[in-house]
Image: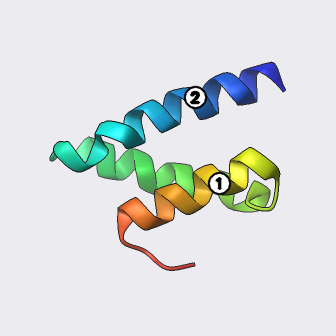
Amino acid sequence: MGHVDAAITQWNALLDIYPTISSTRAEQHLAAAIHHLRPYQGLGDVADLFDRIITLAGLSQ
């Protein structure tokens, strides 16, 4: 799970600054993350990250 933990850390760093940026590419990456994380949304830290992305993207589950 080391790679997953590192990825979650990096995603959370991006999500910390996401509200201060205006970027179509960032929005596209959030949409891709939602798509790729959805199958794992029930797994601990991934669930927290998924919920945070959904909230910041202004979407509902």
* Amino acid at dot 1: Asp
Q: Which of marks 2 and 1 precedes in the sequence?
A: 2
Identify the residue at image location x=73%, y=60%.
Answer: 41
Q: What residue type is labelled 2?
A: Thr
Query: Which numbered marker is on residue 9?
Result: 2
The answer to whether any part of residue 23 appears in the image is no
Are there few (<14), some (14-19), or many (20+) residues within 10 Å of tag 2? some
Q: Which residue is drawn at 60% across and 56% down?
A: 50
Name of the residue lying farthest toward the bottom: 60
In the picture provided, is 9 more to the left or to the right than 16?
Answer: right
Tell which of 40 and 43 is nearer to you.
43
Q: How is the rendered protein coloured?
A: rainbow
* Residue 53 percent coordinates (x, y): 48, 56
Q: The C terminus appears in which quarter of the rendering?
A: bottom right
Q: Is residue 19 above or below residue 61?
A: above
47 sits to left or right of 43: left
Q: Relative to 36, is 38 above or below?
A: below
Q: Name the residue under label 1.
A: 48
